[in-house]
Image (cartoon, rainbow, N blue to C red):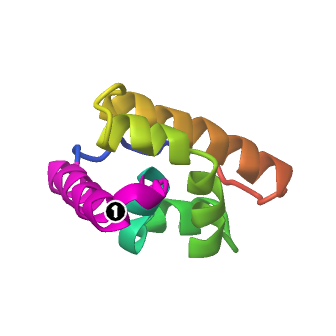
């Protein structure tokens, strides 16, 4: 199974940054950690990846669900923050890390991937 790296969703990166600025302004002196909230707004990154990968994952791994992808991407919240808010990671690297975790997850869950 080969998952392509979708084009970088620059619009989602800008959305995350705008939301972070807004959350920071609302939190005031309470110092709420807004990075994670901004990274997970509307499940934007997993939704974006799911649009590209859903047909491949469903065909190659019968039984693979949206919730499975959410679980995998959840392990990369810090990477999403580094890419989307801090500009310290390239999109290709973020997706490559998610794909590596996804392949381990598929193997551990014993989905029966087709070649």
Question: How far from the left and from the top, in percent, is residue 69?
Answer: 58, 62
Question: Viewer-proximal residue, 95 or 108?
Answer: 95
Of the 4 image quadrants, the one containing the N terminus is top right
Q: Does the segment drawn in magenta span residue 80? A: no
Question: How far from the left and from the top, in percent, is residue 14?
Answer: 17, 52
Question: Viewer-proximal residue, 27 or 67?
Answer: 27
Residue located at (84% from left, 56% from top): 110
- In the figure, is residue 76 to the left or right of 101? left
Chain part drawn in magenta = 9-34
Residue located at (74% from left, 50% from top): 105
Number of labels in the image equals 1
Question: Viewer-proximal residue, 33 or 107?
Answer: 33
Residue position marked by numbered label 1 in the rendering? 48
Decide if residue 39 is in sight here. no
Element at badge 1? helix
Question: How far from the left and from the top, in percent, is residue 101?
Answer: 65, 41
Please tell me whether residue 49 is drawn above or below residue 83 in the rendered image.
below
């Amino acid at each position: 199974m080969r998952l392509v790296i979708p084009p970088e969703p620059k619009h989602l990166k800008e959305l995350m940054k705008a939301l972070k600025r807004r959350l920071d302004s609302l939190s005031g002196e309470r110092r709420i950690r807004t990075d994670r909230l901004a990274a997970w707004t509307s499940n934007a990154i997993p939704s974006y990846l799911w649009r590209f990968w859903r047909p491949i994952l469903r065909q190659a791994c019968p039984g693979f669900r949206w919730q499975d992808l959410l679980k995998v991407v959840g392990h990369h919240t810090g990477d999403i923050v580094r890419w989307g808010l801090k500009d310290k990671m390239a999109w290709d690297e973020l997706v490559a890390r998610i794909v590596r975790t996804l392949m381990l997850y598929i193997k551990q869950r014993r989905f029966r991937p087709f070649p």
